[in-house]
Amino acid sequence: MRLNQNTMLLGKKVVLVPYTSEHVPRYHEWMKSEELRHLTASEPLTLEQEYAMQGSWREDEDKCTFIVLDAAKWQAQPRPLEESCMVGDVNLFLTDLEDPTLGEIEVMIAEPSCRGQGLGTEASLLMMSYGVTKLGLTKFEAKIGQENEPSIRMFQKLHFKQVAMSSVFQEVTLRLAVSEAERLWLLEQTSHMEEKPYRAGLAEPTTATPCEQN
């Protein structure tokens, strides 16, 4: 999505930046993991196919993607390469032609040492806030594999409710309708978020909570 190609979102634990060609090699390495491909229902791609996918997602108006950076690593001095700070990604898919206010959200923390520390939660909150304030979304949906209990619990903590279960696809569907009360709650949860212009590797760092290594 071109709308977010010059936007970065700064949180306490994570920084969200647009998915650029600089991020593709690390992303490609992640997706060699059978576990991650299973959890994200992804097919294995060659590096060339991954570059093509990144380019198409940048152009597609129904997909909004941010790479999730570990803010503690990103704000270190001297400044590290963004690729070395990558921990995952977060996506919004605006594919319901009958309801343009519905976004399907996906979040992946690919680095095992950074899981279970709230990075996925903050990345989801920042993305949801962006979806509400910039994309006009009023409903969110998450489709998660039945065995992925940590992700299911995370979205339930974000006020999502389970609305369906598919035995065929082995996944559950959770939804959140953003009422005025939910909107105020979401904006309160992300009141620390800063939105800044993005130029690869040139944005100023921010204070962050460290991602402790296991």
Image (spheres, grey):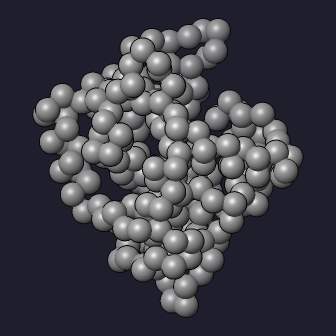
* 156 in relation to 55, above or below: above
The residue lying at 64 percent from left, 15 percent from top is: 169
Image check: 173 left or right of 108? left
Judge whether 17 appears above or below 97 on screen.
below
The one nearer the camera, 91 or 110, is 91
Judge from the rendering whether residue 33 lies leftward or rightward of residue 192; answer left or right.
right
Expressed as whole percent of the image width and height from the top left, the position of residue 112 reads: 62, 55
On the image, the x and y values in percent for residue 113 come to 59, 60
Question: The C terminus lies in which quarter of the figure?
Answer: bottom right
Quadrant hosting residue 201: bottom right
The structure residue drawn at horizontal position 52% and vertical position 34%, both measured from the top left corner, is 62
Q: Is residue 107 visible?
A: no
Identify the residue at horizontal 47%, vertical 30% (top origin). 94
Q: Residue 80 in the image: x percent, y percent?
A: 59, 81
> For the point 81% across and 39% down, which residue is it?
44
38 vs 83, nearest the viewer: 83
Q: Measured from the top left, where is residue 86 in percent x and y?
A: 59, 63
Res. 200 in view: yes
Q: How many marks?
A: 0
| Left-right relation of 21 to 14 | right
- Judge from the rendering whether residue 191 lies leftward or rightward of residue 204; answer left or right: left
Which of the two residues, 53 or 77, is positioned nearer the viewer here? Answer: 53
Task: Single out the residue that lies furthest toward the bottom.
Answer: 78
